[in-house]
Image (tube, helix red, strand yellow):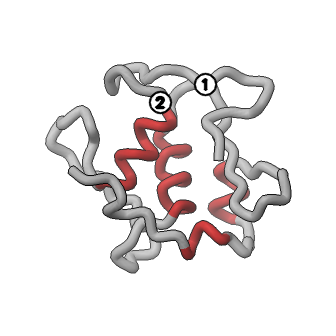
């Protein structure tokens, strides 16, 4: 997983604080709240199974990323990166669906 393609730069947040834009949203997906403490919640559990998978956290972060960068996802080691549209609508299989990341970061 990367915040941008190899011919792009990854950018800092525009208004969320002193973070990388993609990384900020990925971490918010894991903990369920924005780290800037604006009082809102983050619900990246798209399949409503009570867990946040690596793929769900990637999708949340890629959709929320407002900078001019293209996050790439690869969870099978074949070296091929997939953009968020391919990850959402592609058939997989996605190993990241079985990796529960929710709760790994203590609040």
**SS label for mark 2:** helix
Residue 100 lies, with reference to residue 16, above or below; the image says: below
The location of residue 86, given as percent across then percent down, is 72, 57
Residue 16 sits in quarter = top left
Residue 38 sits in quarter = top left
Q: Residues within 10 Å of mark 2 (few under 14, many from 20)?
A: many
Q: CA distance from mark 1 to mark 2?
A: 8 Å
**SS label for mark 1:** loop
Residue 100 sits in quarter = bottom left
Q: Assess whether mark 2 and mark 1 are in contact (beta carbons under 8 angstroms).
A: yes
Q: Residues within 10 Å of mark 1 (few under 14, many from 20)?
A: some
Residues 91 and 36: in front is 36
The location of residue 35, given as percent across then percent down, is 27, 38
Residue 36 lies, with reference to residue 91, above or below; the image says: above
Residues 12 and 86: in front is 12
* Residue behind mark 2: 21
Q: Is residue 11 left or right of residue 40?
A: right
* Residue behind mark 1: 10
The location of residue 66, given as percent across then percent down, is 50, 30
At horizontal 40% and vertical 59% (from top left) the residue drawn is 44
Residue 15 lies, with reference to residue 100, above or below; the image says: above
């Amino acid at each position: 997983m990367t915040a941008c393609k190899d011919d792009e730069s990854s950018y800092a947040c525009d208004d969320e604080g002193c973070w990388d834009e993609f990384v900020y949203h990925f971490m918010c997906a894991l903990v369920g709240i924005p780290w800037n403490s604006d009082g809102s919640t983050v619900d990246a559990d798209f399949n409503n199974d009570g867990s946040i998978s690596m793929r769900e956290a990637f999708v949340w972060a890629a959709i929320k990323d407002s900078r001019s960068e293209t996050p790439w996802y690869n969870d099978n080691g074949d070296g091929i990166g997939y953009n968020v549209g391919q990850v959402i609508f592609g058939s997989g299989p996605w190993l990241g669906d079985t990796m529960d990341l929710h709760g790994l970061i203590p609040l």
